[in-house]
Image (cartoon, grey):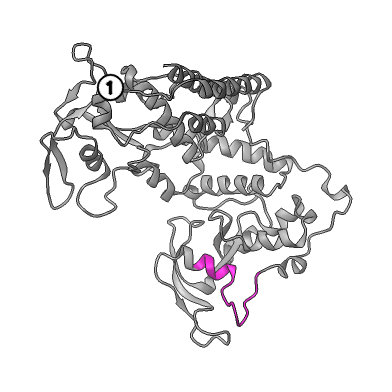
Amino acid sequence: MMRNYRSSISLFFLSAALIALSLMLPACSSGTKEDKAEFTHLAPTPRAEILRILDRIEVRPDEEKINREKGRALASLVPRCRDVENQPGYKEYNSATWSKFRRRRTSGNCEDARARVLIAQSADSVEFTADSPLGKNCIVKSGEWIDYFSVGEPKVKKADDILVTPIVPVENAHLSGAWRWPDSVKYQYLNDTQDPGHLILMTRSQFSSRKGKGPESFMPENKEYQCEYLGRWLETKSKWGLCMTDSEESFVTQMRQTCIDGYKRDSYQHWTDDDDDCLDKRAETLIKDRIRGSKLEVEFKTRGCSVTAGEWYDWYSFDEETKKPPIINDPKKIDVDHIVPLSNAHLSGAWAWSKRKKQEYANKIDSALPHLIAVSQKENRSKGAKSPDQYMPENKSFQCKYIELWTRIKRKWDLSMSSTEKVFIGTELSRCLAN
């Protein structure tokens, strides 16, 4: 993301100060003995590690700057194409020259990049051509693939109807700088099966319609897939050092902002029951976060089992009389909060995620790094979609842990921070280290 000069200088000195503090001060310990006993999965992260994690998180422009610049906030690693045809060594695109870099099947290794992608992305077990001269399990014959480009996302059964191609077409990549690449890099570009967002599936008709076009000239008919397609396009251009034309950048800038502004909570399908045990992720979080030893009641039904009794600490609140988080004994008064709210994650980069990844994030239960936490409805709704520079838990003994979790989640999911958000978190971490 674009960084302005002043925020870069401020963040540089802030990082240096925090590192110095990490060497001099004891590790941060937030919470009382009761907190630790009940929430042992919130073990503190080593002070040097949390500082490194914060330092590696990208900074995006604040909303005011985005509005002022009308959304022109593309990653600085995607440069504009300037007089490509006039640069020394430039060569016109030739499809035959590029085709030689596709991995070929041999008698010793018949699995090419196309087969690997078809096998990995099939929703059902694949079948192979039985009479292949190279042997069995070489040529994929059939399976079940989702056509994300078409409205309704129909399923495709025949492998012959599917083409595997880079998200940025070879012709576009060539004109965007790939003409400079050595043969080894061209080979890697056409056969990179390690990056799940690089090689995509297209029907033959879609492939013919797209050819070498950029997003300004071709976008999937399926509007539900357009933002993911754009996000993959940008990621690939950045990763491979490919430039964008003026018209491409103009379209991508506007479309990207449309995707960011188009947040819908329903796009992040939450409270799923992935293991079919009748308990959705809300119920599983209530069971996980209950006070140890407290009475727990679960109402089992044919569908939609729910937790009907138990006791929970409201970690965001603080009771002045008991000097502890208040206890809630009615599950109907509890919300399950995403530490980093869905809308904040969306703004921070999740707008470009696939449906599957959005659903995974919305329902992630991780004992080592909690994404979901049971809190009072009052505090959760007070928090809303706010970042730590706009909202902090009332419970001061939990604030250091809250900041740590927020930072670790952002880093794990490759989500950005605004400059004010990152500076605030850095300041709070220094306070935690000092205490």
Residue at the location (52% across, 29% down)? 51
The answer to whether residue 263 is above or below residue 176 is above
| Horizontal and vertical percent position of residue 97 | 77, 67
Residue at the location (23% across, 19% down)? 324
Q: Does the magenta stretch include residue 366?
A: no
Which is more toward the observer, 136 or 302?
Answer: 136
The C terminus appears in which quarter of the rendering? top left
Q: Does the magenta stretch include residue 109?
A: yes
User: Which residues are the magenta region?
Assistant: 103-118
Q: Quadrant of residue 154?
A: bottom left
The N terminus appears in which quarter of the rendering? top right
The rendered magenta stretch, by its main secondary structure, is classed as loop
**Label 1 packing within 10 angstroms: few (<14), some (14-19), many (20+):** few
SS of the residue under disc 1? loop
| Horizontal and vertical percent position of residue 309 | 12, 35
Please indicate whether residue 291 sits to the left or right of residue 226 in the image.
Answer: left
Q: Which residue lies furthest to the top in this view?
A: 321
Which is more toward the observer, 165 or 214?
Answer: 165
Q: Which amino acid does label 1 sit on?
A: Thr
| Horizontal and vertical percent position of residue 133 | 58, 87
Residue at the location (44% across, 66% down)? 122
Please indicate whether residue 213 sits to the left or right of residue 284 in the image.
Answer: right
- Tell me how many marks there are: 1
Q: Which residue is labeled 1 in the image? A: 32
The answer to whether residue 257 is above or below residue 118 is above
Which is more toward the observer, 260 or 296?
Answer: 296
| Horizontal and vertical percent position of residue 196 | 53, 56
The answer to whether residue 434 is above or below residue 328 is above
